[in-house]
Image (cartoon, helix red, strand yellow):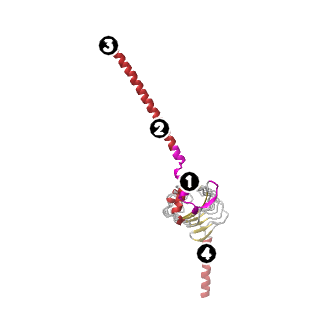
């Protein structure tokens, strides 16, 4: 009897495993190895699968052709903590799309076609710990407030993109940041890079890999370890476009005020002279 019982238990375990792997709540083209994981990796999907269980915690969508995430996609998946969308065809993420998932801890958007990370892309996903944005060959712009509110973020990957500059505020406002990957970008060592260079120098312990940038004069690539603050000494006296506009506007304003003041004074003097002549004329007529 005992061998029969053992075989029966083994069959039940196998059946339950199969039921979880392709259960009634599992999308037809995906696998569900456990009750809270949906694995749709490498299925040739061009859009998000239908009928994803509402209590999913790990959603794996890597290696597909997905080009869009509906802005309300994550509204119903409040338990989602792990989302893998690497190696798809995403070109942009609508602001607010990812802010509705308050428990999200891991997000991988690497190896897509993203061109920009604007303000509000991640809302205030305060639970997010690791964010992968590397290997997006067209990603050339990251807003200074792109990561605003990500107070728990520890690892940020921006390697091998098309970034030539980055506002230092995008990194300095991440209080929990421990690791940042920036290698493989076409950084340019000009005045726009000076503030970022200073931050990177002070936080070199957060860079697991060395960085290189191109010299503006000849385009030669050099390691950041070959540079110092003196390399950007000329930038301290360089005026930005905003500074120039302020100076020009101030000059125009001062000139206008000066002209108006001169006109007012001239008019006042002229009126006084006419009044004086009129007074003298009246006095002479009175004497006669």
| First reached walking from the N terminus: tag 2 or tag 4 | 4
Which quadrant would residue 279 be assigned to in this image?
top left
Residue nearer the viewer, 14 or 158: 158
Q: CA distance from mark 1 to mark 2?
A: 31 Å
Residue nearer the viewer, 57 or 209: 209
Q: Quadrant of the C terminus?
A: top left
Where residue 251 appears, as percent x and y from the top left, is 49, 39
Q: CA distance from mark 3 to mark 2?
A: 49 Å
Disc 1 + disc 4, Cβ < 8 Å: no
Q: Which mark, residue 181?
A: none
Which quadrant would residue 277 be assigned to in this image?
top left
Q: Which mark, residue 192?
A: 1
In the orientation shown, which residue stands out farthest toward the bottom? 1
Q: CA distance from mark 3 to mark 4?
A: 126 Å
Which quadrant would residue 19 be assigned to in this image?
bottom right
Residue bounds of the magenta highlight: 217-245
Q: Which residue is mark 3?
A: 287
| First reached walking from the N terminus: tag 3 or tag 4 | 4
Q: Which residue is mark 2?
A: 254
Disc 3 + disc 1, Cβ < 8 Å: no
Residue 146 seen from this side: no
Residue 242 inside the magenta-drawn segment: yes
Q: Is residue 118 above or below residue 207?
A: above
Circle 1 SS class: helix
Circle 4 SS class: helix
> Residue at image x 50%, y 59%?
172
Residue 51 inside the magenta-drawn segment: no
């Amino acid at each position: 009897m005992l061998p029969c019982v053992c075989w029966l238990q083994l069959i039940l375990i196998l059946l339950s495993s199969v039921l979880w792997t392709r259960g009634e709540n599992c999308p037809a083209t995906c696998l569900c190895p456990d009750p809270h994981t949906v694995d749709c990796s490498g299925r040739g999907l061009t859009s998000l699968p239908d009928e994803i269980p509402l209590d999913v915690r790990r959603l794996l969508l890597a290696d597909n052709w997905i080009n869009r995430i509906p802005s309300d996609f994550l509204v119903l998946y409040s338990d989602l903590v792990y989302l893998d969308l690497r190696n798809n065809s995403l070109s942009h993420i609508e602001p607010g799309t990812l802010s509705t998932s308050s428990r999200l801890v891991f997000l991988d958007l690497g190896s897509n076609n993203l061109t920009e990370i604007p303000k509000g892309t991640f809302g205030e996903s305060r639970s997010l710990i690791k964010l992968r944005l590397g290997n997006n060959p067209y990603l050339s712009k990251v807003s200074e407030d792109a990561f605003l509110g990500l107070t728990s973020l520890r690892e940020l990957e921006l390697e091998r993109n098309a970034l030539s500059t980055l506002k230092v505020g995008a990194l300095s406002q991440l209080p929990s940041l421990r690791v940042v990957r920036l290698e493989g970008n076409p950084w340019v060592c000009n005045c726009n890079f000076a503030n970022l260079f200073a931050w990177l120098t002070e936080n070199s312990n957060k860079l697991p890999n060395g960085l290189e940038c191109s010299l503006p004069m000849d385009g030669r690539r050099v390691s950041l370890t070959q540079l110092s603050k003196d390399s950007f000494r000329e930038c301290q006296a360089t005026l930005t476009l905003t500074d120039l506009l302020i100076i020009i506007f101030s000059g125009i304003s001062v000139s206008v005020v000066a002209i108006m003041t001169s006109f007012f004074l001239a008019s006042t003097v002229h009126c006084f002279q006419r009044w004086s002549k009129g007074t003298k004329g009246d006095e002479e007529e009175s004497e006669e």
